[in-house]
Image (cartoon, grey):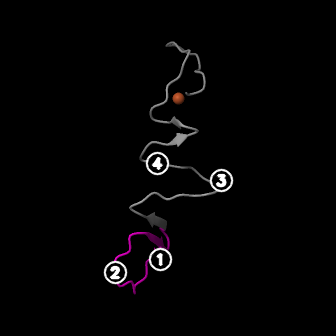
Amino acid sequence: MYIRTLWTAKAPKHVITITPGSGITLTSPQPVTVNADLHVNGSVTATGDVTGGGISLDHHTHGGVQSGGSTTSPPH
Ligand SMILES: [Fe+2]
């Protein structure tokens, strides 16, 4: 892993960019793995699907529902 500096000789593949006033950006061509519970004190935004416990936010279905004002059962 490299932290981008003004003195990097060749372009790194994994980059953490810290920009004062704009935040921190982690860029990698490969997945980023966190081997620990992850606690976020703020919202989470994803441009792709999110899967929790094997259930996709984009593609899950609900059972036992009909059109109307009722609420659904948990996603599955
Ligand atoms: Fe749902």
The residue under label 3 is 37
Residue 30 vertical placement versus 57 (above, below): below
How crowded pointer 4 is (Cα within 10 Å; few <14, some 14-19, many 20+) is rated as few
Measured from the top left, where is residue 62 in percent x and y? 53, 22
How crowded pointer 3 is (Cα within 10 Å; few <14, some 14-19, many 20+) is rated as few
Q: For the point 49% across and 36% down, which residue is it?
A: 56
Residue 46 vertical placement versus 30 (above, below): above
Dot 1 beta carbon under 8 Å from ligand 1: no
- Amino acid on which the number 1 mark rests in the picture: Ile
Which comes before the other along the chain, label 2 or label 1?
Answer: 1
Residue 28 appears in which quarter of the rendering? Answer: bottom left
Q: Is residue 9 magenta?
A: yes
Q: For the point 45% across and 32% down, which residue is it?
A: 59
The residue under label 2 is 10
Dot 4 beta carbon under 8 Å from ligand 1: no
* Separation of marks 4 and 1 at Cα, in angstroms: 24 Å
Q: 57 or 18: which is nearer to us?
A: 57
Q: Is residue 66 magenta?
A: no
The residue under label 4 is 46
Residue located farthest toward the left when viewing the structure as drawn: 10
Q: Secondary structure at mark 1?
A: strand
Contact between marks 3 and 4 (CB within 8 A): the answer is no
Q: Secondary structure at mark 3?
A: loop
The magenta segment: 1-23
Residue 12 appears in which quarter of the rendering? Answer: bottom left
Contact between marks 3 and 2 (CB within 8 A): the answer is no
- Amino acid on which the number 3 mark rests in the picture: Asp
- Left or right of 10? Residue 23 is right
* Separation of marks 3 and 4 at Cα, in angstroms: 18 Å
User: Residue 3 has which mark?
Assistant: 1
